[in-house]
Amino acid sequence: MSAGTAISAHGVGVTIDGRPILGDVGLDVAAGEVVVLVGPNGAGKSTLLSVLSGDVTPSAGHVELAGRHLGHRSARELARLRGVQLQKQGLAFGFRVHEVVRMGRSPWHRTAAAERDDVAVEEAMVRGDVIELADRLFPTLSGGEQARTSFARLLAQETPVLLLDEPTAALDIRHQEQVLGVVREVAAAGAAVVVVLHDLSLAAAYADRVCVLAGGRVRADGPPAEVLTGDLLSEVYGHPVDVVEHDGALLVVPVRPRATPTAPTTQEAPCSAG
Amino acid sequence: MSATTVPVTPVRATLRGIAARVGLLGGLGVALVVILVVSAGTGQLDVPADQVLGSLMHKIGLDIGPVPTHPQGENTLWQVRFPRVVMAALAGAALATAGALMQGVFGNPLAEPGVVGVSSGAAVAAASVIVFQWTFAGTWTVAVCAFLGGLVTTTLVYVMSRDGGRTEVVTLVLTGIALNAVTSAGLAFLMFLGDTQAREEIVFWQLGSLNGSRWEYVGVVAPLAVVGLVAAMLLAPRLDLLALGDRAAKHVGVDVERLRMVTIVVVAVLTAAAVSFCGIIAFVGLVVPHLIRMISGPGHRMLVPASALGGAVLLVTADLWARTAVEYADLPIGMLTSLVGGPFFFWLLRRARRTAGGWA
């Protein structure tokens, strides 16, 4: 609700086939802020992102983007305000990587910003680390390379709001860090960013705020150090979770039953419990 | 982020793209003019190319080049050959463009008016005109009905084969089989209803033929084809974005539903233009866009105009062959295109399986 709010959800509820997916979700994301959505499978993270991006019309509540009701904007207008990276990338034809990245510029065709097309595409390809792939055919790339190309396309769109659904899922550790590092840079330059992540340690490292969803509701929302606690996460995920501090960074690790590392011997049938 | 260290700058790639564009379109344009002149001059009465051009020049009031020396030359050219080659060029351009548009809008390289049954849907409507002798719109009656038939079938294919924002290859081909079954039943019923003359007309229709092209018919087909082609060029840039899938296309600003509805209407117009007087000529819309994609990539800005030119070249050539391969016989052109197109379709399917959906 603050003056810098770029995108906000108000009392959003989604019901699909009579089953409630989201209920009374409120979320404010300010310009310059990275908000990470976490939660167990089926918590409604992707649905919330779809509502924020305008793909799904909520059955209750509404979303405000740049101070106006999301549903009142045209597709092209929306495309200049928010960019989306979906979890799954697909492409029907064999376009080359640089062509796919350039598709991100299409909302700006026939506007003054179109002058920046070449520069924006090039910058986006450098930041997404896909320069070497520029002339490759998108369908022949690996999953991680496709995800980086889509990320570059999103950057080329140069929108003040960015929504990313698990952008790091298919990436190796170097590119995970790189992509989220760029996300932070983009936010520092004034963009509002919402990212769905599964890796809680990554969330802790890169989020300004973490929003924990469970059962379609916001369970907690705040700075990583406040939200990511062992108790809360253990409860939400239904699995004991430890949060430890290492070199000033929060690490979230699942508690694993000790697999008796001291005695990995081959004890067979007469196994005694104590 | 310095532009100088980058191996392939987008600017250079764009320039290269423009050069390739001009080259391909220019090449196809020249090929079309050459084949049109050759085809117009070839037949039972041969007219040399310079006389064909001379005849054209004199018609538009320029006193350049020789006129046909044969006493029947002028008549043959203007009464028989010219309407026929023009009709072939228009039908070929319309079919190939309709194919390119359909593939773009379905995000599926196997979509083609003939394969998915849109052509036969339009043909059923046109056959109804023959059998019931409708004349509510004069010469235009056939075209109007073919357009409606094409529109209904295209919409049906679209509704039935789409699931979760994309069209699977298998679903599309099976939908085509189902639709073709229904439309052939419709055609069979119409043949049963019709008299001998109507039956014969319908049979030739199904075979596809440019025999009997007249200026009168060209006058109907030409405006339809031109309107369809112009609309296709206007739609082309946005079709690229549909390749991203419905959701991602929307995210970059495409009004997906509207674009798709408009494109379907344009496909129906183009299909009607081709089918109204030439019958079912399958596979042109499949073969041509594929060959163009192999040469210049999948970008629709290039694909649509190049397909139109390529389709025209292909059909004029096929027609030339159809009427000269066997002396005193005019082979059905639809038979020829299917003879070549069938194996090509098979090869595409095999390749699609190998690359597992990577339609490079």
Image (spheres, rainbow, N blue to C red):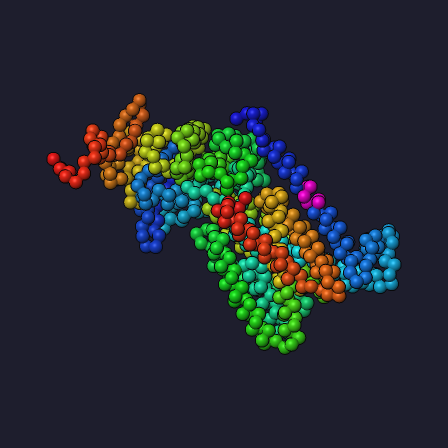
| Residue B95 x, y percent position in the rendering | 63, 56
Q: Quadrant of residue B76 in the image?
A: bottom right
* Residue located at (50% from left, 32% from top): A130
Task: Specify the farthest residue to the top.
Answer: A247
- Asked if residue B144 shows in the view, the reply is no
Q: Relative to the observer, which residue lies in front, B23 or A27? A: B23
Q: How many marks?
A: 0
Q: Is residue B182 above or below residue A157?
A: below
* Residue located at (46% from left, 38% from top): A142
Residue B23 lies in the magenta-colored region? yes
Quarter of the figure that contains the N terminus of chain A: top left
Quarter of the figure that contains the C terminus of chain A: top left
| Residue B169 x, y percent position in the rendering | 49, 53
| Residue B4 x, y percent position in the rendering | 58, 25
Q: Main secondary structure of the magenta part?
A: helix
Residue B119 lies in the magenta-colored region? no
Q: Quadrant of residue B113 in the image?
A: bottom right
* Residue located at (51% from left, 29% from top): A126
* Residue located at (39% from left, 45% from top): A51
Q: Relative to the observer, which residue lies in front, A50 or A131? A: A131
| Segment tinted magenta in the rendering | B22-27
Q: Is residue A166 left or right of residue B168?
A: left
| Residue B9 x, y percent position in the rendering | 58, 31
- Asked if residue B46 shows in the view, the reply is yes
